[in-house]
């Protein structure tokens, strides 16, 4: 594969949606859609009336038409739902998903990848989180039906994924071990023959890692090995790998990273696989630096998160750009916010759950369930719990109440941030905005006299090819 220098990082939920990935790939770089929460994204876009008719267009190309019709009929609302009406719920992820949930996952991922790939010859990837295991098999299958070029996965050790991709490509049944807290792992299974027998193109697989030791496992012990790495540092947006060793907090309450957290690039070079560097690499100088280190290029998220084609709500983008121009940007690496337990970068924003007064009125609810952990109940059955759900419920399920402190509902918050927020008991779910340290510098992509910038502006700035350079 002819890999480009710039990978536009996958950004969930629906921040890096098909319009952004398509814009980036049209410029000859790699566009990446987010596969996180993709079933909810499609179900809600259909309830908003499929603005622009894009979903309907993609579905004309879906190879199992009766499945597309089932999903369409279940969620589509002509002209869109009333503004103050809640979105219809959809099945939450589970180890034994219903046929309806698998239908929705496969159709949703197909639509997203198909739309991202339309109209250019560039590469399209899909980003998934290892931590969110339950929807993975159906999501990968939907992406492969749309001929996704690359799968990128971080937030865990995605050792089994290369083998799963091989099996799905051959049209064979596959399975994946699912972590169960304090007990034997569970098993998620998927058979493509239940849908469409036959072979599919096998995408490449890039693992997103922060240390060479993890990369060595994935290069030497995964069968087949991974195809390359994105090496992400702790200034990147979204979730960050926790610091090595016991977590120390600075005076602001953020995790402290030290020299042990700096990836040993010579070990990556020794592996002989292509790698991209991520975390504040969105400038021409930083690209040159990465290339000089032997990298294939860089992965950039924050710069793209606030460009015109990103899914982030326009008001949030405008405020972030204004702060960057005014020198007022500030990011907090929150060690507790994410139910995953990973540090999560949060921007303070009026009306967002970053604000204590918003947290105070928001009622805890877990109705999306992507970040729920599986545990064994006393009767041996599998149960589900999330430290951001109501504390009494979490405790009743054997969870430690101390683990609920400071947790935010990342699922609802991120959906609100892209204009797909739920209305819960008459109140709109508040937003939750994440960005890397580079958010302070997004004004560098503005062209003279402009208040917004495009994905192409970001790419030209990084490549040093803007006409005014
Ligand atoms: C808004 C936002 C959401 C993100 N969501 C994800 C995600 O869902 N999965 C993931 O692997 N990385 C995610 N990231 C990380 C990016 O893919 C990328 O690696 C990172 O942003 C690179 O560092 P930078 O932010 O300094 O450019 C996210 C980043 C941002 C800014």
Image (cartoon, grey):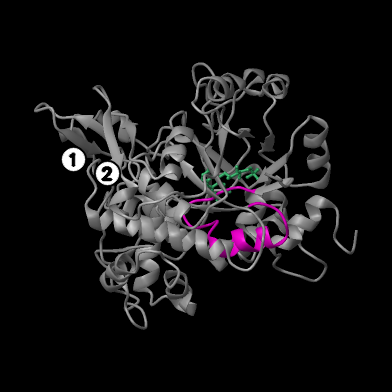
Q: Is residue 356 visible?
A: no
x 69%, y 61%: residue: 455
- Magenta segment boundaries in residue numbering: 8-30
Q: Residue furthest front?
A: 198
Q: Which mark is residue 393?
A: 1
- Foreground pick, 323 / 295: 295
Asked whether the residues under the numbered discs 1 and 2 touch, taking CB atoms below 8 Å apart as contact, a structural biologist would say: yes
Image quadrant where residue 427 sits: bottom left
Q: Does ligand 1 reach within 8 Å of label 2's beta carbon? A: no
Tell which quarter ligand 1 is in.
top right
Q: Position of residue 437 (x, y in %)?
A: 65, 43
* Residue 296 point in image, percent of width and height: 74, 38
Name the residue that disc number 2 marks: 389
Residue at x 23% of width, y 54% of height: 99
* 297 lies left or right of 417: right
For residue 142: magenta? no
Q: Decide if residue 297 is on the left or right side of residue 9.
A: right
- Where residue 443 sits, quadrant-wise, is bottom right
């Amino acid at each position: 594969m002819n890999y480009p220098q710039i990978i536009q990082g996958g950004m969930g939920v629906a921040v890096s949606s098909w319009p952004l990935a398509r814009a980036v790939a049209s410029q000859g770089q790699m566009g990446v859609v987010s596969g996180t929460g993709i079933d909810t994204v499609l179900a809600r876009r259909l309830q908003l009336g499929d603005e622009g008719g894009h979903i309907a267009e993609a579905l004309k190309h879906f190879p199992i038409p009766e499945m597309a019709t089932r999903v369409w009929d279940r969620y589509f609302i002509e002209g869109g739902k009333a503004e103050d009406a809640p979105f219809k719920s959809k099945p939450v992820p589970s180890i034994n998903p219903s046929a309806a949930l698998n239908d929705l996952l496969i159709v949703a991922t197909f639509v997203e990848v198909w739309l991202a790939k339309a109209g250019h010859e560039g590469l399209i990837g899909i980003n998934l989180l290892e931590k969110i295991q339950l929807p993975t098999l159906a999501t990968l299958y939907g992406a492969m039906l749309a001929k996704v070029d690359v799968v990128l996965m971080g937030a865990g050790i995605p050792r089994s994924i290369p083998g799963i991709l091989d099996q799905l490509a051959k049209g064979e049944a596959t399975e994946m071990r699912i972590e169960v807290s304090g007990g034997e792992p569970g098993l998620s299974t998927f058979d493509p023959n239940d849908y469409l027998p036959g072979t599919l193109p096998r995408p490449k697989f890039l693992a997103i890692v922060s240390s060479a030791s993890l990369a060595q496992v994935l290069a030497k012990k995964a069968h087949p090995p991974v195809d390359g790495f994105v090496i992400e540092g702790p200034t990147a947006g979204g979730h960050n790998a926790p610091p090595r060793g016991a977590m120390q907090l600075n005076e602001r309450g953020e995790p402290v990273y030290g020299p042990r957290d700096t990836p040993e690039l010579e070990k990556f070079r020794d592996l002989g696989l292509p790698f991209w560097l991520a975390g504040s690499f969105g400038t021409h100088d930083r690209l040159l630096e990465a290339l000089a280190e032997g990298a294939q290029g860089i992965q950039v998220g924050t710069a793209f998160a606030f460009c015109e084609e990103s899914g982030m709500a326009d008001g949030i983008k405008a405020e972030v750009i204004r702060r960057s121009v005014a020198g007022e940007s500030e990011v907090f690496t929150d060690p507790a916010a994410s139910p995953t337990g990973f540090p999560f970068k949060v921007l303070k924003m009026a009306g967002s759950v970053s604000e204590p007064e918003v947290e105070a009125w928001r009622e805890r609810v877990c109705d999306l369930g992507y970040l729920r952990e599986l545990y064994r109940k006393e009767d041996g059955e599998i149960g589900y719990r999330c430290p951001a759900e109501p504390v009494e419920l979490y405790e009743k399920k054997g969870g430690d109440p101390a683990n609920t402190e400071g947790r935010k509902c990342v699922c609802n918050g991120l959906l609100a941030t892209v204009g797909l927020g739920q209305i819960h008991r008459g109140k709109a779910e508040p937003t939750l905005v994440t960005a890397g340290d580079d958010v302070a510098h997004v004004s560098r992509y503005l062209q003279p006299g402009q208040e917004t910038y495009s994905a192409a502006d970001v790419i030209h700035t990084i490549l040093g090819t803007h006409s005014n350079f």
